[in-house]
Amino acid sequence: MNFEFHALTDPGLVRDNNEDSVALDPDNRLAILADGMGGYNAGEVASAMATTFIKTELGRWIAEGGFEASARELKRAMEICIDNANRSIFNAANANPQYAGMGTTLVMGVFLDGRVMIGHVGDSRCYRLRRGEFVQMTRDHSLLQEQIDAGLISMEQAQFATHRNLVTRALGVEDTVLLEVNEYRVEDGDLYLFCSDGLNDMLSDERIAALLVTAGTLEEKATALVEAANGAGGRDNISVILACARARATRRGLLSRMLGQ
């Protein structure tokens, strides 16, 4: 399986600074997106620390043999990496008064032949578009999601909730954090979208799916998403990572295409 990646981040129309951070390691098929929070500039420090640390440490582990690892081994490597990143952010927040209270949500994907491991903390999301079906792959770690799960609020009411951005998990807030990791099968033509809530708070899932279907290249799709979120108000930073899976051409398939069959 071959994978193509593209990332884009934008401050939006309301905020002066961008507290989101994105990182790609195409060689190791690693995508990371973080949405920072905290005092002035502290959120962007936390998100940058998270993406940089994970890209460096997990990327090194994958490069040294991670592609051959079992799902259990990869999951454990992801958990250890997140734990170390969390402690680094937590310690920095406690050692520097200007960083007090900083933290970040996170969503990441490690793509292997035929499968992907998706990990997340907080309300940054991953979606998948497969043969026209658009599905949210992650479940928000948020107070709003807990209320929906408990039947205290409907999905319709949730669209207008004022506390939709209160997360129940984040890196750097406590000395430990739980990364949720799930493994999924990857099929030819799958398109994965990782995003901060600056996108899905502004656009419905239906609108996001429509843009992914109609736009052209990954760069054009990412640009269309960001422009649409800004067109809807752009109240937060907007970040997206797109990952597209394509089956490797076999010798027979390549010959057939050359012969026009």
Image (cartoon, grey):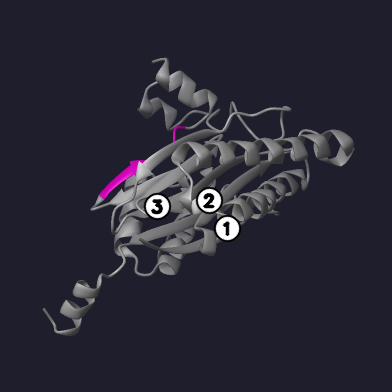
- Mark 2: give few (<14), some (14-19) or many (20+) Cα within 10 Å: some
Mark in the foreground, 3 or 2: 2
Mark 3 lies on residue: 192
**Which residue shows up at 76% across the image and 40% down it?**
88
Residues in magenta, as a range: 133-139
**Which residue shows up at 68% across the image and 53% down it?**
52
x then y, percent, for residue 159:
42, 33
Q: Is residue 195 above or below residue 145?
A: below
x then y, percent, for residue 200:
46, 44
> Is label 1 in a helix, a strand or a loop?
helix
Mark 1 lies on residue: 63
- CB under 8 Å between callouts 1 and 2? yes
**Which residue shows up at 56% across the image and 36% down it?**
76
Give the quarter of the figure containing the N terminus. bottom left
Which kind of residue does numbered mark 2 sit on? Gly
Mark 2 lies on residue: 66
- Mark 1: give few (<14), some (14-19) or many (20+) Cα within 10 Å: few
Give the quarter of the figure containing the C terminus. bottom left
Of labels 3 and 1, earlier in sequence is 1
**Which residue shows up at 32% across the image and 55% down it?**
190
Mark drawn on residue 28: none
